[in-house]
Amino acid sequence: MLNNKEWKLIKFAAGADNCNIGDDCAVWEKKSLVITTDHMCEGVHFDLSFMPPNAVGWRLMAANASDILSMGSRPVCYLLNIAVPKGKIETAEKMISGIKQFASNYDISLIGGDTTGGKYFTVGVTMFGEKPEKPLLRSGAKPGDTVYLSAPVGLSKCGYFHVKNKTDGFELSKKRFLFPDPFTTMPISFRDINSAIDISDSLITELELLSRSSNVKIEVDYDMIPIEDDVKKSAVLLKIPLEEIIFGSGEEFVLLFTSDKLITGSYPVGKIIESKEPEVEVFNKNGAIDLTAVAVFNHLS
């Protein structure tokens, strides 16, 4: 799952001696900050022919806030950069209104940024949070830990199809796609968490990243994964295998984490096993499930 163009670029940028460049955020020890940045490009991350501009802005803020939250911090301020096509100022203002609404809801201050022109919309945010005493890292999973999901997954991919096709109903999945809110899908407390990663690319991708970063085997019991009725009905309607939605849905902004404690309010879905090589195994009552054909979210598609 990780042998894709995006990860080849990340490894190239990091260099051969530093191919694992970190977590959902950079940790700036000297300034006691966690920092993340995300940008979204028209035609890759959003399509204004069926998505309202304010939802684009909201989703961008959600992506960044999810990274900050997944480190055990809380966003406090952000920088905004936007490239605006000629004659599209009104659309840009609507996009920015979604950004401002998210920021206002959670008291996140704008401290600067940049504007420019472009053939297509590109909008990016760099977000800052105070470094917690114990930042949550991908490398902290320990043998014996339970693997948890903080909320059900799969809704975002379903919502994308329903918004694009103007399907009646399916309001839960449409909302998760257009206006995801990581503040409502994170654990109540981060105190007893050993490792964490937010689900932005897909569940299977994040499982593999967690496994590699901690050098452990992860066993996932498919029958324990929480699945919303919206997702089950969508799988039937869209004629997509249910496991492809669950493991391939991106931009969920839900936390995948491990702990050696019982975490109430979250969903135990597997366990961490000591291993000489990182590995992810998904099984159900009938045995192992082959997920090699699952199409995952791709930022370069």
Image (spheres, rainbow, N blue to C red):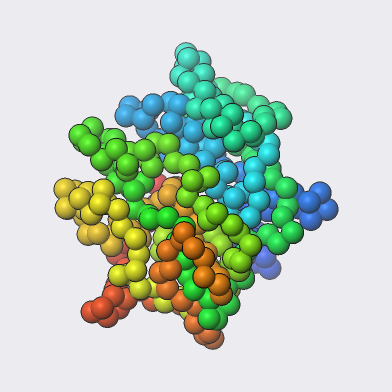
Q: Position of residue 95 (x, y in %)?
A: 49, 25
Q: Position of residue 87 (x, y in %)?
A: 47, 13
Q: Nearer the viewer, residue 151 or 177?
A: 151
* Residue drawn 56% across the image and 22% down it: 117
Instruction: Give the quarter of the figure containing the N terminus.
Output: bottom left
* Residue drawn 33% across the image and 27% down it: 49
* Residue drawn 23% across the image and 54% down it: 232
Position of 276 relative to 190 (above/below)? below
Q: Image quarter for residue 149?
A: bottom left
Position of 151 relative to 146 (above/below)? above
Q: Nearer the viewer, residue 86 or 74?
A: 74
Q: Name the residue at the right extreme.
A: 30
Position of 59 relative to 14 (above/below)? above
Q: Is residue 268 left or right of residue 19?
A: left
**Number of numbered tags placed on the structure image:** 0
Q: Position of residue 276 (x, y in %)?
A: 54, 86
Q: Position of residue 267 (x, y in %)?
A: 42, 63
Q: Is residue 198 left or right of residue 73?
A: left
